[in-house]
Image (cartoon, rainbow, N blue to C red):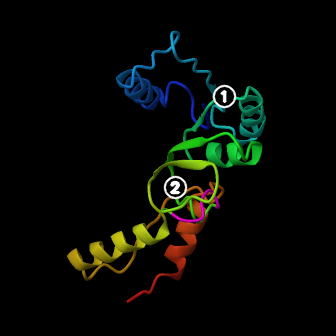
Amino acid sequence: MPGLSSAANTSSWVEALLSGLRELAHVEGKSLVVESRWAEGSNDRLGAHAVERAGLKPDVLVAFQTPAALALQRATMTIPIVMVPAGDPIGTGLITSFSRSGGNITGVSTGGPELHAKGMGIFRDFVPLFLRVGVLANAAEPFSKPLLARFLRAPTS
């Protein structure tokens, strides 16, 4: 399981995954081996972690967040990858559509720019007189790029 965050920051996600696997009768150390690598916030580490994980030829790879899913996508086209969660998987090139991923990636998405733009429309319905919106995002993060572009193209009235 490669991830950009630290093991401490994602421990609840990992525990939820392991809990779900236990419900399916997969128990770590008995019928399941889980090997994790964390980039500790450094995108530079993800590529090496992804190649290392794919080289072990696991049955499935789990990617926590978009940058890890992108690194795994570059590392393998054959091993199934589960992304949990990934932002804008279509805009970042992880999948071709929500109905058919077009590759070896599946999982959970936090949506894409269209969903967030729709949210802004709903917000405008509730607060019709707002004039300015502040957006705080990491422009270097793959999910943020299409989201920010969509916000910049949004109509002002």
Q: Label 1 amino acid?
A: Pro
Residue 121 spot, x, y in % from top left: 33, 77
The first of marks 2 and 1 along the sequence is 1
Vertical position of residue 94 compared to residue 53: above or below: below
Residue at screen point 47% across, 64% down = 135
Which residue position holds label 1?
Answer: 58
**Hey, which quadrant is residue 91 in on the image?**
bottom right
Closest to the observer: 90 or 105?
105
82 lies left or right of 121: right
Quadrant (top left, top right, bottom left, bottom right) of the N terminus: top right
11 lies left or right of 104: left
Q: Which residues are magenta?
A: 93-97
Residue 88 spot, x, y in % from top left: 53, 60
Vertical position of residue 69 compared to residue 27: above or below: below
The secondary structure that most of the magenta stretch takes on is loop
Q: Residues within 10 Å of mark 2 (few under 14, many from 20)?
A: many
Q: Residue 87: which numbered mark, if any?
A: 2
